[in-house]
């Protein structure tokens, strides 16, 4: 049985070099993370697999007549790339330990990649791997929506909206739910409609919560089966006991500062990946082994 590797939170460059001196060390770490109870066949689950001489390949005799051979990266984001695992680990470590995110340009310089496209592609693959299985939130939960991107005054004149205040907005709505002292679930919306907002709440939040706190937006009008209380921002009564949305607003502020500071602008197409990245870091903020969690999900 493979031993559980030591937790890896934030390492210095020297610590990273010492923990992962070569490809073999990275391979051992990946195998121990993926298969904590010993290597099993990714096709059929058979645990009686034969290790091949390379030390990173196995053969299963149970699911294929002539034996199915697989490597330690099969089915992960590290499969079929020409980059060493060590580079992937470096990039992953930088991403999950940079509180506000880190741009592909910074990654390119720091790791020494020759092309921006390489760094950019790796970052997106890692973001996709950070998407977590979601469990409905309970306890005290806050739900709120925000808008990301598209400040007209920062855009080139020909990209600015025309037609004044009736011009279509380039901002993208994101909705989120956070359990106080717990996890966040955030999602990009097509529109902030009652239907979309309510569907999100029903998916992300248990209707057995002790309190669901939102602002007074009408999109939350239909949640009659929840113990739902609203914050009346308009009446300047921001915090009435437990009824506030300060926690989710705190998450939005980390997310926005990250998007503006590290990524400058993010297109609607890729916004869900950035949401996943910030959600993963937030939900693992007390996890001493955040790097290990990222690798295990890769
Ligand atoms: Zn098999």
Image (spheres, rainbow, N blue to C red):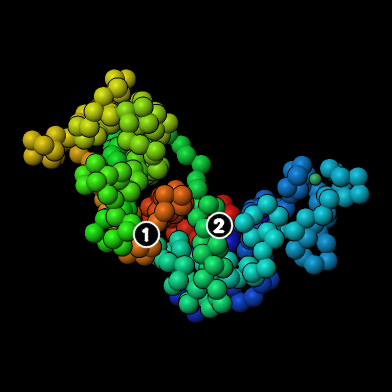
Quickly name the residue at label 1. Answer: 265
Q: Residue at left 64%, top 70%?
A: 84
Q: Quadrant of the C terminus?
A: bottom right
Q: Is any atom of residue 138 visible in this view?
A: no
Q: In the image, is residue 11 above or below residue 31?
A: below
Image x and y of residue 172, in percent: 35, 46
Q: In this image, 294 relative to 53: left or right?
A: left
From this viewpoint, which residue is outermost toward the top? 225
Q: Horizontal and vertical percent for residue 99?
A: 37, 62
Q: Which residue is mark 2?
A: 125
Disc 1/disc 2 C-alpha distance (Å): 19 Å
Q: Residue at x 28, y 60 (%)?
A: 157
- The kind of secondary structure element at disc 2 is helix
Does residue 55 appear to the left or right of 97 in the view shown? right
Mark 1 nearby-residue class (10 Å; few <14, some 14–19, many ≥20): some
Asked whether residue 161 is in view, the answer is yes
For ligand 1, give the image quadrant: top right
């Amino acid at each position: 049985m493979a031993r559980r590797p030591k937790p890896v939170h934030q390492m210095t460059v020297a610590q990273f070099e010492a923990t992962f001196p070569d490809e073999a060390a990275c391979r051992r770490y990946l195998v121990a993370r993926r298969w904590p109870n010993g290597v099993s066949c990714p096709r059929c689950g058979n645990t009686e697999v034969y290790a091949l001489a390379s030390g990173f390949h196995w053969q299963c005799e149970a699911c294929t007549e002539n034996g199915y051979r697989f490597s330690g990266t099969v089915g992960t984001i590290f499969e079929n790339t020409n980059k060493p695992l060590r580079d992937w680990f470096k990039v992953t470590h930088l991403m999950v330990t940079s509180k506000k995110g880190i741009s592909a340009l910074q990654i390119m310089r720091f790791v020494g990649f020759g092309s921006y496209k390489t760094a950019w592609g790796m970052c997106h693959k890692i973001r996709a791997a950070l998407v977590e299985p979601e469990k409905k939130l309970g306890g005290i939960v806050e739900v709120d929506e925000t808008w990301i991107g598209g400040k007209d005054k920062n855009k080139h004149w020909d990209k600015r909206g025309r037609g004044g205040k009736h011009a279509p907005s380039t901002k993208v709505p994101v909705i989120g739910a956070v359990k106080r002292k717990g996890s966040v679930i955030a999602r990009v919306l097509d529109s902030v409609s009652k239907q979309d907002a309510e569907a999100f709440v029903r998916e992300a939040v248990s209707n057995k919560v002790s309190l669901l706190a939102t602002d007074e937006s009408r999109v939350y009008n239909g949640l009659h089966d929840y113990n739902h209380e609203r914050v009346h921002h308009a009446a300047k009564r921001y915090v009435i006991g437990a009824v506030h949305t300060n926690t989710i607003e705190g998450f939005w502020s980390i997310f926005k500062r990250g998007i503006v500071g590290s990524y400058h602008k993010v297109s609607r197409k890729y916004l869900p990946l950035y949401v996943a990245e910030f959600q993963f870091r937030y939900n693992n903020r007390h996890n001493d082994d955040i790097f290990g969690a990222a690798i295990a999900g890769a």
